[in-house]
Amino acid sequence: MVKSIYAFLLLCFMAQGHAAFATHAFSLYDTPKYPAGFTHFDYVNPDAPKGGELFLANPDRRSSFDKFNPYSLKGVAAAGVSNLMFETLAVSSGDEVATMYGLLADDMVLAPDKLAMTFHINPKARFNNGDPVLAADVKYSFDTLMAKGAPQFKSIFAEVKRCVVVDERTVKFEFKSLNHELPLIVGSVPVFSRKWAAGTEFDQIQLTPPIVSGPYLIDRYDTGRSISYKLNPDYWGANVPTRKGTFNFGRINYRFYKDDVAKLEAFKAGEFDLVVEYSAKNWARSYKGPKFTSGEIIKRELTHSNGAGMQGFVMNLRRPQFQDVRVRRALDLALDYEWMNRQLFFGSYKRIYSFFNNSPMAATGLPSADELKLLEPLRDKLDPVVFGPAPTPPNTDAPRSLRANLLEAVELFRQAGWTYRDGALRNAKGEPFAFEIIDDQSALSRVISVYIRNLEKLGIQVTQRTADFALVQKRMDEFDFDMTSIRFPDVSSPGNEMFDMFGSKAADEKGSSNAWGLKDPAVDRLVEKLVAADSRQQLVAAARALDRVLLHKHIVVTHWYSSTHRVAYRDRFGIPATAPLYYQADPYVISTWWQEKAR
């Protein structure tokens, strides 16, 4: 499953120099690319026509929905509601990192001591009920998310002291500490009206349409089957530079399918317009036929510059059987990636080797001098192996083999107190080593089956369970799982979201991204160093040191990655001449393409 981390966590951070800001933009390190007075981003068509329809299938395998509130913990939010309806004070651009430009805000200033960020709200900004967006709404949104929103908000905004209304259209966020990333974080607080579902507790809001400022309105829905959004004819921000040329479709429709097979067949039959394909097997074998040959359906790989986010089988360290690092190393040795890539993936992937895969932040070889400056003060809290070479994933290419890896795993299990007897791998008490792998992706079943086959050779008893998105999400939010497949979002540079992924406090916050249950003071300290970095050099060193420590903990059996988005779509769209550098396929299509041909 894809771990849900809200849009404000996906701001890309990677640049050089010192913090720079102007009234229209803020950059963590560098000078903003777009000057004051710019009219649109380079990767949009400012003259794109408005209108037409886009039909999509449910993303993230969420085969149903029961609420329109994307920021509460319980329930499943309708596809598209966050991206199409909610807006923030500022947004990042797709061809820069660590930089934000005003959206609801038309002016933003960092205090000289960097302990506060002030935003002035554009007087033209309006909610979809016609009310102006005011500073009181921003404060209400922030305070509500902290008090009643999903637990992630408390982790992400932990260093924000308070939100203060300065005047009717000016709001100030005060910080507890010199955290360089906080201006970007508070700039991406989702804003909603104080009138939304008035009288109902925020975490109890279900199917009450949001009163928000975004470009779309909910037009109609059939719970669990479909939802349609229509472009707001009175949308306030159509000509704001950060919105010009975006959100061009007059209507966006989502249809919900129970599984990937049904979804693909529905796409071929013309029920919706576009598929982002994550299965190499499907891409190679299933995207063929007369409609592809004729050009009615276009099959294309879109290149990007995203860092490859972590993906793999995550072990829940809250479970006793996974608490010994030797056990976790042994479980890693049982995955035969090279065989899978040849036999299942058509050789189309590369193995993930880092938590900051495919980026300069990945740890390799021995620690650099800059890394050692961060690691040495923590030596008494770290395994000595951290000061050696960074670990690489096990492989089965000659002269290695799966048999050799399994024999090594047997020895690691023996050292950890697990030996094979009476038909199973058992501890000193005679208890068998057993666990469940739960997932919501039918496409991963064959991968899991191959992995289980190897685990069973070691005497491990594994139960495979495939469940629907809502059930898996609920169990993940409660940390009620043994092992599961998770894909964390791509980031071009790590930042405050690391507290939510690896921080000790987040391990006890239900719904956080710390699925593995990691609690380690050395990791906490390195995350603090990473977030506090005030230069590109410091950021890279802290990320590599953190990566090195995490890799040696073996908390995930890593999967694979691709440097392209595989997209198939009907030949009826206009596409901007220039693509952004950093983007996800679905939001890119929805926000920048337009209709050229009717269905």
Image (cartoon, grey):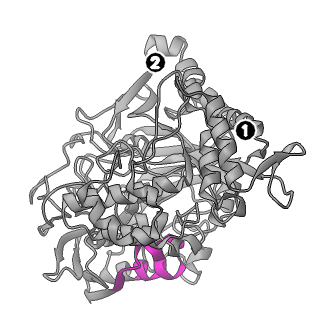
Q: Secondary structure at mark 2?
A: loop
Around disc 1, counting alpha carbons within 10 Å, would you say few (fewer than 14), some (14 to 19), or many (20 or more)?
A: many
Percent of width and height locating residue 343: 60, 21
Figure label count: 2
Marker disc for residue 153: none
Task: Please name the residue shown 72% across and 40% down the image.
Answer: 455
Q: Quadrant of residue 322?
A: bottom right
Amino acid type of disc 2? Glu
Percent of width and height locating residue 37: 9, 58
Magenta stretch in the rendered image: 140-162
Marker disc for residue 296: 2
Is 417 within the magenta?
no
Instruction: Kindly identify which residue carries mark 1.
Output: 452
Amino acid type of disc 1? Ile
Q: Quadrant of residue 170?
A: bottom left
Magenta part, dominant SS: helix
